[in-house]
Image: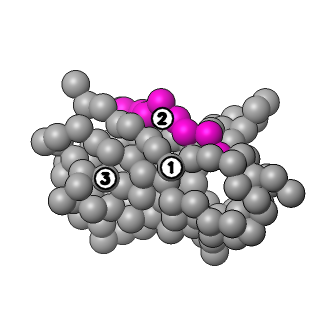
Amino acid sequence: QVQLVESGGGLVQAGDSLRLSCAVSRPTFSIFHMGWFRQAPGKEREFLAFISKSGGITYYADSVKERFTISRDSARNTVYLKMNMLKPEDTAVYYCAAKTTYTPNDYSATPYNYWGQGTQVTVSS
């Protein structure tokens, strides 16, 4: 059973930074491409960022690409999302997800096989 556990969310002020972490159960981390998504109340789940299993390919949603950075640490079986210059509209539950297939510039959630439970990020104005 593959488990993903997010952490690092919280309540911050506009302009602050946060780093979310997603720990993936061993020993399967290296086979997974990873993504970050978020879902705000009353809205659909939104793609944010992708990183390939090698770490060599990343891409982002236009809404966050100048402010968010995805990375992974294979030694720690962890993927990160560093978020800078947070805005109130970034308030949402943030999810990490894992998939084994790769399609260039695929922003959809459907191919992801495994999901974490989510971590709440709240940005006050």
Kindly report the distance in space between the C-alpha atoms of the residues bearing marks 1 and 3. 12 Å
Which residue is found at the position 27% from the left and 62% from the top? Answer: 73
Tell me where residue 84 sits by quadrant.
bottom right
User: What residue is drawn where x is 32% and y is 45%?
Assistant: 23
Q: CA distance from mark 3 to mark 2?
A: 22 Å
Q: Residues within 10 Å of mark 1 (few under 14, many from 20)?
A: some
Query: Residue under circle 2?
Result: 110
Label placed on residue 8: 1
Magenta residues (range): 111-121
Cα–Cα gap, marks 1 and 2: 25 Å
Residue 9 vs 14, above or below: the answer is: above
Task: Reply yes or no: does residue 119 show up in magenta.
Answer: yes
Residue labelled with disc 3: 78
Which residue is the extreme one toward the top?
1
Along the horizontal axis of the image, is 68 left or right of 6? right
Q: Amino acid at mark 1?
A: Gly
Considering the image in quadrants, where does the C terminus appear?
bottom right
Please tell me whether mark 3 or mark 2 is closer to you in this view.
3
Upstream in sequence: badge 1 or badge 2: 1
Please, what is the three-letter code of the amino acid marked with disc 2?
A: Thr
The picture quadrant where one finds residue 16 is: bottom right
